[in-house]
Image: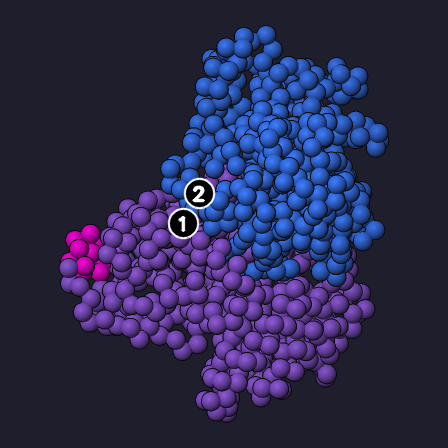
Chain colours: A blue, B purple
């Protein structure tokens, strides 16, 4: 906690003048609310909360803070899972919630221009009448903002077919600490004009500038979806299945993976029906999308032999849309419900897809070695496995001293398998202690150099990994 | 020309020691060969040509050159269209032609690891037995290297469906001027671990480091291709057609555009048959791909109404594979044949797809104003239009003084339409004078800051746009 009662009232007056009193808050409830995101039990109070609604206001704020060395933390919906937006050094939180306008849908060019406080699912809803959609679908999409998605390079189940946030960002309006405003690129599908500042901003976690507007690429909306559920007795059979499906030219929108231990927690809590044949250890939930349900059924038919061949214990299709909703509900609430079980740490491991069985096996062995239980689920189609480590009855000492050693081993295993320590959550605070598993001093130096080019005085998101 | 007869023989001896005499050349034929690429009539002689074949050798070379302030220019196949690899300040050209090994095809994870001197088309051929392919297909793919493709963020006809080089680069081995060797990322489809150094390297034109190895994403190979040729009486009808096709959920691999004036040049030279109904001003060449020719024919059938509706003068399918080859040959040789007509300047304009008619109209008006003829062709599906400005009988004065004013106007029009000055060729030398149409001082400062982080002494590709 770094709340600072002596935060200069001169600063507060200056911001009141700029934004109006309604958009400047030192109210303790307000500050408390922005002291947390969805990451474990972390909390850091800022000194001041600002809620601007124009790029020009953000420019003025940054210029002022840069001159006065005031830390700035930019916040979307606060649904992050790495603590990247938390004001660890106090100072100012800029809430983007009033940047919530969709400015233009360019139906001819499949593009949308919007302010970055727009919520992901609201954008999707808004686009439906145009027959277009924005595919990235992080679990948080009901509340997370496009700006937060950009800051973290957010993924989601449908990354298998559609890629992640990175693949949809064409051009960004960015305010730099100097107060200067730039557009990073052009509204085009191709761009070989200088270093890609656009791509550099994606995943930069509020360290380089504040993204105020975005031009996003859209794709035609698929109107139909079909789920296939396949339980397996072990992860390697499931992984073989994933590979067979993809290599044979099928293009599922997603292939989700759930350990039975996680599904059981969700079933118990939600009291919903879910198939569980004997010997089930792991589930694949395959998502097909298209515009014609008969075609999807035909694709599903042609998938069965591959599921059988790979050793699926059974293959289930939902009888009706209610069943499909239940399956989605179980998958989507899994993370939250697992985390309600106990104090936890969530790791966002990612490896080449076919290495998932090795990773899961390794996670369990490391758990045995350090005495922790883990529940894994995630995205089998792209190798992104969320490993939830549960404290359960573990002593505080073991939790704070032994478990981190186990996490280092998990990340070392990821690296060995060709992977890394975050697939879609970012570094923020919680991955920061483990970053040297994958970064050398040279990586840090390059990234610090990039940081200096954008933010020479280090006012943006100070106290994080860089 | 900056050839320097006094280039230190101490340096030469040092490189002979490192690489062996066979891989160090001051032979004037060798130097002449690497003084040019495929860009207009530019030529700059280096002092020395090195042909290393290990990352460690490149590390030693860079460390030595950094200590001795010797300019380094990295060269793939020299097929670039912007002059980005040319040694404008003499010094050393490093040829990557011996970095030609494909190190590993990971069939399970749809990845290949290779040295960056591997030729694009050779990679495609190598991957066929695995049932996989690397989609980016720049016109130069028969000779251009993966390293050159990465340096320029190369695109190609199939970018419509498959994206550009950027979308396939997962992880890069890079040698920095300090001699340090890093891998930029991980071999994963998702990665939110720090700033994306991988994406920063793509399109960085040899200014930040030398990319020695790459891990590329692959996709299942499509075995069948079907072409559809549709002539139109004007560009706006063709553009409407493109939009209708894409919005109705068709996923053509490519939609190429050719002005009739360019096609006529190709037909005359190649003496090949090509349909040309009356009133034809512009052609669309639509490329469908898949694994089943009956399915492709069915898709083509369902496309016809959209072509008719948009006003196609006729719709042609090739009778046989020979006809299809002829159509591809005409499209692929168009650029080269147009450029044989006259001294030329090629601009690599790019705008949002549906703005192409406005761009083409503007180019013609600007041509009339400044007295030049232009021939346009390119990628209708992604808004990337190659504008070839022909000198014909124009005076040298008009060519060097008036035409550049017209080019500025063309690029200003691109910007106005939401586009930029290079879609897939890069900046290099030829786009450099026009960069301030789209970059402000702030953009330059950010990019110079990034450059400093990687190459503080500026030994990599000096004398270019940064």
- Foreground of the two, B463 or A448: A448
Q: Which percent across, then down, holds residue A431?
A: 52, 29
- Foreground of the two, A448 or A66: A66
Q: Which percent across, then down, holds residue A457?
A: 49, 44
Q: Is A271 placed above or below B191 here?
A: above
Q: Is A108 placed above or below B17 here?
A: below
Q: Badge 1 sits on which subunit?
A: B
Q: Which percent across, then down, holds residue A146?
A: 68, 44
Residue topped by disc 2: A448
State yes or no: discs 2 and 1 in contact (Cβ < 8 Å): yes
Q: Which percent across, then down, holds residue B98?
A: 31, 55
- Magenta-drawn segment: B11-24
Left-right relation of B335 to B453: right
Q: Badge 2 sits on which subunit?
A: A
Residue A118 shown in magenta: no
Residue A270 visible in image? yes
**Callout 2 secondary element:** helix
Residue topped by disc 1: B453
**Callout 1 secondary element:** helix
Dominant secondary structure of the magenta stretch?
helix
- Which residue is at 71% across, 43% downward? A16
- Foreground of the two, A356 or B432: B432
């Amino acid at each position: 906690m770094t709340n600072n009662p002596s935060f200069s009232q001169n600063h507060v007056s200056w911001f009141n003048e700029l934004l109006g009193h309604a958009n400047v808050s030192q109210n303790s409830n307000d500050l408390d609310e922005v002291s947390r995101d969805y990451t474990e039990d972390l909390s850091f109070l800022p000194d001041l909360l600002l809620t601007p609604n124009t790029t020009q206001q953000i420019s003025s704020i940054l210029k002022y803070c840069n001159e006065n060395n005031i830390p700035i933390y930019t916040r979307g919906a606060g649904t992050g899972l790495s603590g990247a937006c938390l004001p660890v050094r106090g100072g100012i939180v800029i809430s983007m919630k009033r940047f919530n306008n969709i400015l233009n849908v360019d139906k001819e060019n499949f593009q949308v221009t919007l302010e970055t406080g727009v919520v992901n699912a609201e954008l999707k809803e808004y686009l439906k009448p145009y027959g277009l959609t924005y595919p990235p679908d992080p679990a948080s999409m009901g509340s997370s903002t496009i700006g937060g998605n950009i800051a973290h390079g957010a993924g989601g189940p449908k990354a298998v077919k559609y890629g992640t946030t990175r693949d949809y960002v064409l051009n960004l309006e960015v305010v730099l600490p100097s107060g200067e405003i730039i557009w990073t690129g052009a509204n085009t599908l191709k761009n070989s004009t200088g270093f890609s500042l656009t791509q550099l901003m994606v995943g930069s976690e509020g360290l380089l500038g504040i993204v105020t507007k975005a031009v996003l690429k859209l794709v035609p909306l698929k109107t139909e979806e079909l789920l296939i559920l396949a339980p397996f007795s072990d992860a390697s059979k499931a992984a073989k299945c994933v590979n067979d499906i993809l290599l044979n030219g099928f293009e599922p929108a997603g292939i989700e993976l759930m350990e039975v231990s996680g599904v059981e927690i969700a079933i118990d809590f939600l009291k919903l029906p879910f198939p569980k044949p004997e010997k089930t250890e792991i589930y694949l939930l395959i998502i097909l999308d298209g515009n014609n349900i008969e075609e999807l059924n035909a694709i599903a038919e042609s998938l069965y032999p591959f599921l059988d061949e790979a050793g699926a214990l059974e293959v289930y299709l939902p009888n009706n849309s209610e069943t499909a909703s239940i399956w989605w509900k179980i998958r989507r609430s899994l993370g939250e419900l697992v985390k309600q079980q106990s104090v936890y740490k969530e790791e966002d491991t990612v490896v080449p897809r076919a290495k998932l069985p090795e990773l899961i096996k390794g996670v369990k062995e490391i758990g045995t070695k350090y005495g922790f239980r883990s529940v894994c689920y995630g995205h089998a189609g792209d190798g992104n496995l969320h490993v939830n480590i549960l404290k359960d009855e573990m002593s505080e000492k073991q939790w704070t001293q032994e478990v981190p050693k186990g996490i280092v081993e998990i990340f070392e295993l990821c690296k060995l398998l060709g992977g890394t320590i975050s697939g879609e959550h970012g570094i923020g605070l919680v991955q920061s202690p483990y970053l040297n598993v994958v970064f050398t001093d040279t990586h840090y130096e390059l990234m610090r150099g990039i940081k200096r080019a954008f933010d020479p005085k280090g006012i943006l998101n100070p106290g994080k990994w860089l």
